[in-house]
Image (cartoon, coloured by chain):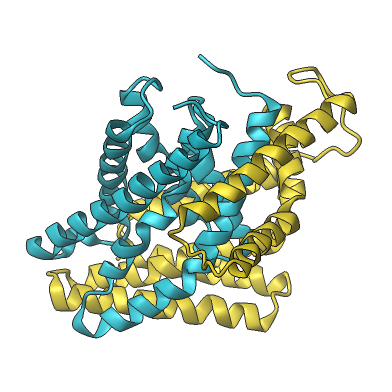
Amino acid sequence: MKRWHIRDIILVTIIAFFMGVIFWAIGPVYTILQAALAPVGLSPLANELVIGIWVMAGPLAGFVIRIPGSATLGELLGAVVEMFLGGMWGASTLISGVLQGFGSELGFIFTGYKRYGWFTLALSALTTTVVTFTWDLFRNGYAAYHLPLLLLLVCVRFVSVFLFGGVLTKLINNLLVRAHVLKN
Amino acid sequence: MNPSLKLALLVLIALEVSFAQVWSVNVALIVVSLGLMLINHIPWRRLLWLTLVPLFFAGTLVWSLMLRGNASPHFLIVLFTRMFVYVYMGGWFTLTTKPLWLTRSLEQNAKLPSKFAYGFLAAFNLMPKIQAEVATVRAAALMRGEVLHVWSPRLYFKVILAAMNWSDQLAAAMTSHGFVEDAPRTHALTVPLVARDWWLFGISLLLVQVGLFVGLP
């Protein structure tokens, strides 16, 4: 199995930083969505809609670097950047970062870091959704919502994670393969 | 306080608070963090920002739960104060911790392999270049009448290519300057880790445990 070298470490950090800048830039959109949905009591839906962008660093790093731990590290570093750029969730960002990264890492673990295609991406989106949603059941008190809303939230989250962490990551990967910087 | 221990304390408390349902401990943590931020001369605009935004988020969360859930008032207060615990503790941490010092401390005190510490630092200093690169890629696309969005694969593709280039060059530069992975290193600047740090860490953690398990509301 591949080991971490200084080049990979720098690469995962740069990718994470780039994603961190995006996480941070998406903040206002999130706030506006939240405000728009708040009056009808659906503000958690805002979180579910954009969460795909937040968890993208994991699968992207996992796809580009292909070393065990790269998804977790990529997502964690993205969270660190977000924190130091002035994102405000502090320690909670770090915990979410580790969990989101580990969630997508699970998809790669289950396929033994051997298959890099649709199946792995879909699996990774699923594990990310399960891990992060379990965390939100506690942290954001999601467990107290009525069941229909809870089901809606899970579905929207999975779609968002799949679109950004799955479809978009795959499209980026295709471009990289066509440019011969990544093996298929 | 030693940066690594401070980080550990922050994460441990945040983790516990996420599962515990004791609002009085949350309030105590908020007051302590606020005090620490004020002692460290937080700019008032930053403090205002750190207060208004979680107020908004906590407000919408509680409102949604009231409208669409069956949470007890006690649980709602816990959730409301929990948001502020995260934000204020995080605010105190980023206000009093420099990324460079934290990385050094993680390497020296927490035994993070030096290749990770120096790899992070090397990339960290590229931050302005990363932001400029995003702007360049977007501008170049605009000149061809193409608008790149957050969901455009091409935007990520181009930046990843740049990232690959830079990481190759940086790694080569570090090697040519004598950096050897996993080789023992000496440190020009050492981050102190003294008994006082451990006491502060232990007592803070102990106080939180007492607060959480003594039966406070």
Place of residue B99 in the rendered image (x, y in percent of width and height, measured from the top left): 71, 51
Residue nearest the observer in this picture, B41 or B207: B41
Which residue is pictured at 74% across the width and 18% down the height? B182
Q: Is residue B124 visible?
A: yes
The answer to whether A177 is drawn above or below residue A5 in the figure is: below
Q: Chain B's shade in the image?
A: yellow
- Asked whether, in this view, residue A48 is left or right of residue B134, the answer is left
Place of residue B213 in the rendered image (x, y in percent of width and height, measured from the top left): 34, 51
The answer to whether A51 is drawn above or below residue A167 in the figure is: below
The image shows a total of numbered marks equal to 0
Residue nearest the observer in this picture, B78 or A49: A49
Which residue is pictured at 58% across the width and 19% down the height? A3
In the image, farthest residue toward the bottom:
A39
Residue A112 occupies quadrant: top left
Place of residue B103 in the rendered image (x, y in percent of width and height, measured from the top left): 71, 42
Q: Chain A's shade in the image?
A: cyan
In the image, farthest residue toward the top:
A1
Residue B165 occupies quadrant: top right
- Asked whether, in this view, residue B16 is left or right of residue B190, the answer is left
- Asked whether, in this view, residue B105 is left or right of residue A32, the answer is right
Residue nearest the observer in this picture, B127 or B136: B136
Quadrant housing the C terminus of chain B: bottom left
Q: Is residue B29 visible?
A: no
The answer to whether A65 is drawn above or below residue B100 in the figure is: above
Which residue is pictured at 74% across the width and 59% down the height? B128
Place of residue A154 in the rendered image (x, y in percent of width and height, measured from the top left): 20, 55
Residue nearest the observer in this picture, A79 or B130: B130
- Asked whether, in this view, residue B63 is left or right of residue B208, the answer is left
